[in-house]
Image (spheres, rainbow, N blue to C red):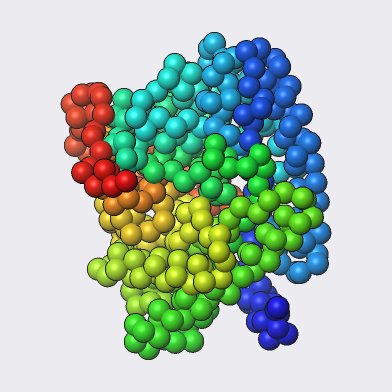
Amino acid sequence: MISTYEVIETNKMIDEARLDVRTITMGISLLDCIDSDINIVNEKIYNKITTCAKDLVKTGEEIEAKYGVPIVNKRISVTPVALVGGAACRNEEDFVSIAKTLDKAAKAVGVNFIGGYSALVSKGMTPAEELLIRSIPVALSSTERVCSSVNVGSTKTGINMDAVKLMGEIIKECAYLTRDEESVACSKLVVFCNAPDDNPFMAGAFHGVTEADAIINVGVSGPGVVKRALEKVRGENFEVLCETIKRTAFKVTRVGQLVAQEASERLGIPFGIVDLSLAPTPAIGDSVAEILEEIGLESVGAPGTTAALALLNDQVKKGGVMASSYVGGLSGAFIPVSEDQGMIDAVNRNALTLEKLEAMTCVCSVGLDMIAVPGSTTAATLSGIIADEAAIGMINQKTTAVRLIPAYGKSIGDSVQYGGLFGYAPVMPVNPYACDDFINRGGRIPAPIHSFKN
């Protein structure tokens, strides 16, 4: 039961602290769309998505009206397309045709993004998976709503350095093909290590092969709510600080649980998970960086930043798991530069560097996210950054990811401007020394010894 007090408190969080449900994401399995004929595959994919998700947007809007909770995005994730198209796709153009079908279906049902143009290659690549990866630049530059992800490593299998090298090249090509649009294709491409298969957040979302035919996942966000709560305990000790974060995370997750259950019941589709991620937006007061500064830092990036982020991430998870039996996805704190005004300000005042962001990813929920680097950054350097981040994930048994934007034609001091959810990002400096000989070795970095726990 939800008490009158809880309803009033939730309304205050919505009105005063920018609480929202960031996304309702319907996961849809496309395994039954597999066929040897690419035309039949595309027809089946379009028909299944438009049938399963025909009421998704309407249902989200009805729940918004009923509870007064903003639901910002309605999205779809699908089975990794490398698996779906493997039997039919003979070349890159065949895979691109699937991307265009996904885009067409997303527009037909009214969702803002569709994820799952993906390949899972942590140990090796099949010919179909390599074809999909090589098709990513054209696929993302010729569609509007399709998002892509590639998992290049895991704790159990190690890091596929052939895939890491290839992804550096792919990111560069994405930047070039959308050079007239601020290299926007790069903002829709994530490179993972230890990718979860129940992640509703774009651009890395896809529907795992272990999932049901269709599920409803909800991603909740509330950095503004957490910051507002911490303002009331300014100067208190760490025990009070932690308890405040946990209690706030509990309340935010309960809102997500309510919305998820309602959507599941209305659509007749099983409930999957609630992802409680403190995912910022460019809006003032909706910043993870500002939470860290409220904890006691003069600026994010200052000494103590990694410790403060570790504390925040852990308490968010502890509060969330008390509120729902099915907390999953990435749940914790995101630190995307372009989507967080506090992070942007810290970069502009030279308080936050790429190296400090990498250190922060050791303790947060994801990785180097929405970071613009000079367009002259080489593919090998991009691959080196991916390899570093994958190593953090592999050794620490956690999900890490990279979403880099080598902004074509831009250098330090410039910025990329996207507007909306993606915001804008100052171009950050990258270490100028090369790692080509390391990246060009090829093969696989072995899994760490603790991978043999079973």
- Left-right relation of 137 to 219: left
Give the residue displayed 39% in from the left and 73% down from the top: 293
Q: Residue furthest front?
A: 454
Residue 414 shows in the view: no
Q: Tell me what residue is drawn at x 61 percent, y 52 percent.
A: 272
Front one among 273 and 375:
273
Q: Residue 58 appears at what percent x and percent y?
A: 81, 51
Residue 453 in the figure: left or right of residue 182? left
Percent coordinates x, y for residue 360 in the rendering: 32, 58
Q: Residue placed at 75% from the left, 69% from the top?
A: 68
In the image, what residue occupies the spot 81% across and 59% down?
A: 62
Q: Where residue 241 sits: x, y (%)?
A: 40, 81
Q: Nearer the viewer, residue 294 or 89?
A: 89
**In this rendering, is residue 388 above or below 8?**
above
Where is residue 253 shown, x and y percent of the image? 58, 68
Q: Does the image show residue 204?
A: yes
Q: Nearer the viewer, residue 49 or 335?
A: 49
Nearest to the observer: residue 264 or residue 259: 264
Q: Quadrant of the N terminus?
A: bottom right
Could you say which quadrant of the image residue 262 lies in? bottom right
Label total for image: 0
